[in-house]
């Protein structure tokens, strides 16, 4: 959870101390987890973690559409080892 100063910058001064000392409230702007070498489609809404590396993720809610080949990753500019 961000500190009061960070909350003030993100949401304005009125929200800086609104949460009190309750650290169990999650940050609504915290990003969900996407694994390495994934491509996230434009407008996709993540509702959880993407469990498969090297995959194309799209949709609302976002889900894995297909696995990405080595060639597809190279074409997108990833440095594939």
Image (cartoon, helix red, strand yellow):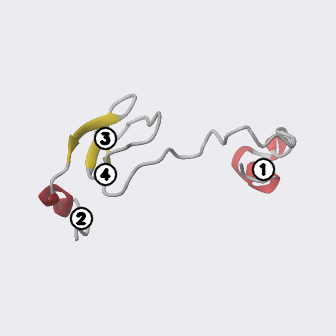
Eye-nearest disc, 1 or 2: 2
Considering depth in this image, is 51 or 26 the residue closer to the camera? 51
Residue 12 percent coordinates (x, y): 77, 45
Eye-nearest disc, 4 or 3: 4
Eye-nearest disc, 1 or 4: 4
Q: Secondary structure at mark 1?
A: helix
Q: Secondary structure at mark 2?
A: loop
Q: Secondary structure at mark 4?
A: loop
Q: Secondary structure at mark 3?
A: strand
The residue labelled by disc 2 is 77
Eye-nearest disc, 2 or 4: 4
Image side of residue 15 versus residue 70, left or right: right
Question: Residues at badges 1 and 2 in contact (C-beta under 8 Å)?
Answer: no
Question: Residues at badges 1 and 4 in contact (C-beta under 8 Å)?
Answer: no
The residue labelled by disc 4 is 53
3D distance between C-alphas at marks 3 and 1 = 33 Å
């Amino acid at each position: 959870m961000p500190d009061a100063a960070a909350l003030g910058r993100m949401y304005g001064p009125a929200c800086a101390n609104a949460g009190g000392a309750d650290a169990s409230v999650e940050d609504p702007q915290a990003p969900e987890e996407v694994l390495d070498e994934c491509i996230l489609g434009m407008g996709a809404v993540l509702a959880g973690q993407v469990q498969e590396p090297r995959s194309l993720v799209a949709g609302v809610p976002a889900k894995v559409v297909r696995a990405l080949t080595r060639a597809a990753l190279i074409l997108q500019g990833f440095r594939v080892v």
